[in-house]
Image (cartoon, rainbow, N blue to C red):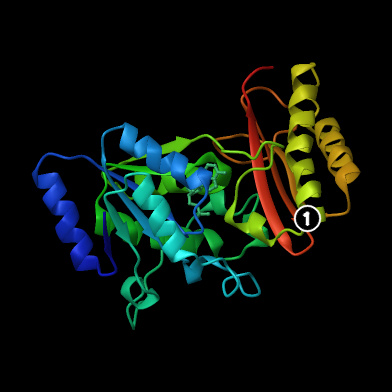
């Protein structure tokens, strides 16, 4: 496994792999790697691709007052995990490498960034798309792997790739969960033991919504009320949103006809958790 911090090294290594006929699979991350990340790495490897992982805590996707400074940075452990999972090349750029002095160009996102997390995280998706576009131009992957965990991000990146004619495929993989259903996340490390127990309530709430739909309920209002009830039973928290949305447009649905996405963003203590469930039946 090679590790490089400079754009030119990554270009050279990726070009060499391409030259010998390898397809390039890319997994962009912010590090603090867990089984959600390794599921994406494993997918790329299983697809037979020369697998590139980036580890970069991207400053432009954190809104003022968010956890940029405190975000877990565990590079040595991350590199070991990459090695164990057969990654070929790891990109660990500095902020100056990706945002050179004088940098002023950004990818502006449309209405897809105005729903769900958008209003709560101003500038977030612009920061995500800007860094992902730069990374795509550096690595030039054939396929980039993303997690359904960040459902809005996946939809927005798919749209960016289409709208900006980027020559690659986006492969979105299922959410990896802890045994009690909590979606794996680097931010779960912030949770105290009590908060960690409570956090399982987010998935329980989504499952309750799904079960209502399966039982024939179609009124989104009723489904949201039930999800809120189950979440509140787990303990006190602040709900940014608990929504019934269209999985493609991310707009609210008043009628929960399939396919539908149940989406949650919840603050437990200081930790903001997101999760979602797609319901295809009903
Ligand atoms: P992050 O390091 O949080 O930026 O995440 C990097 C990639 O891993 C993104 O595509 C995420 O959607 C994905 N990811 C994070 N957590 C999970 C999870 N629990 N299951 C599947 N993919 C995940």
Q: Is residue 114 visible?
A: yes
Q: Is residue 77 left or right of residue 138?
A: right
The residue labelled by disc 1 is 193
Left/right of residue 77 with respect to residue 221 in the rendered view: left
Where is 250 relative to 65, above or below? Answer: above
Which residue does the image show at 86% across and 34% down from the upper left?
226
Secondary structure beneath dot 1 equals helix
Which part of the image, by quadrant, shows the N terminus? Answer: bottom left
Measured as percent of width and height from the top left, residue 33 is found at: 49, 53
**Residue 135 x %, y %:** 33, 59
Task: Classify residue 204 as left or right of residue 69.
Answer: right
Residue at 61% from the left image edge and 25% from the top image edge: 259
- Image: 156 above or below 105: above
Please state the horizontal and vertical placement of residue 223, each as a whole percent of the image. 81, 31
The quarter of the picture where residue 213 lies is top right
215 lies left or right of 19? right
Q: How many marks?
A: 1
Q: Name the residue nearer the viewer: 142 or 78.
A: 78
Find residue 124 and report its horizontal and vertical position in percent.
55, 62
Q: Quadrant of residue 8?
A: bottom left
């Amino acid at each position: 496994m090679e590790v490089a911090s400079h754009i030119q090294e990554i270009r050279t290594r990726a070009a060499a792999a391409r030259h010998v006929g390898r397809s390039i699979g890319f997994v962009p991350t912010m590090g603090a790697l867990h089984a959600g990340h390794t599921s994406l790495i494993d997918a790329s490897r299983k697809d037979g691709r020369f697998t590139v992982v980036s580890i970069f805590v991207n400053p432009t996707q954190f809104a003022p007052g968010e956890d940029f400074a405190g975000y877990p940075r565990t590079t040595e452990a991350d590199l070991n995990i990459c090695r164990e999972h057969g990654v070929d090349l790891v990109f660990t750029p500095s902020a100056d490498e990706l945002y050179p002095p004088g940098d002023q160009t950004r990818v502006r996102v449309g209405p897809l960034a105005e729903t769900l997390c958008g209003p709560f995280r101003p500038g977030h998706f612009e920061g995500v798309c800007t860094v992902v576009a730069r990374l795509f131009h550096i690595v030039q992957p054939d396929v980039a792997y993303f997690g359904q965990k960040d459902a809005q991000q996946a939809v927005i990146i798919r749209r960016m790739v289409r709208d900006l004619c980027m020559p690659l495929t986006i492969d979105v993989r299922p959410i990896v969960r802890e045994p009690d259903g909590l979606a794996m996340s680097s931010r779960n490390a912030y949770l105290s033991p009590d908060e960690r127990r409570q956090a399982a309530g987010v998935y329980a709430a989504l499952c309750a919504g799904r079960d209502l739909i399966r039982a024939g309920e179609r009124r989104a209002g009723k489904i949201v009320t039930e999800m809120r009830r189950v979440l509140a039973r787990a303990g006190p928290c602040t709900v940014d949103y608990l929504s019934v949305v269209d999985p493609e447009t991310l707009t609210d649905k008043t009628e929960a006809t399939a396919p539908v996405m149940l989406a949650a963003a919840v603050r437990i203590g200081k930790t903001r958790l997101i999760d979602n469930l797609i319901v295809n039946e009903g």
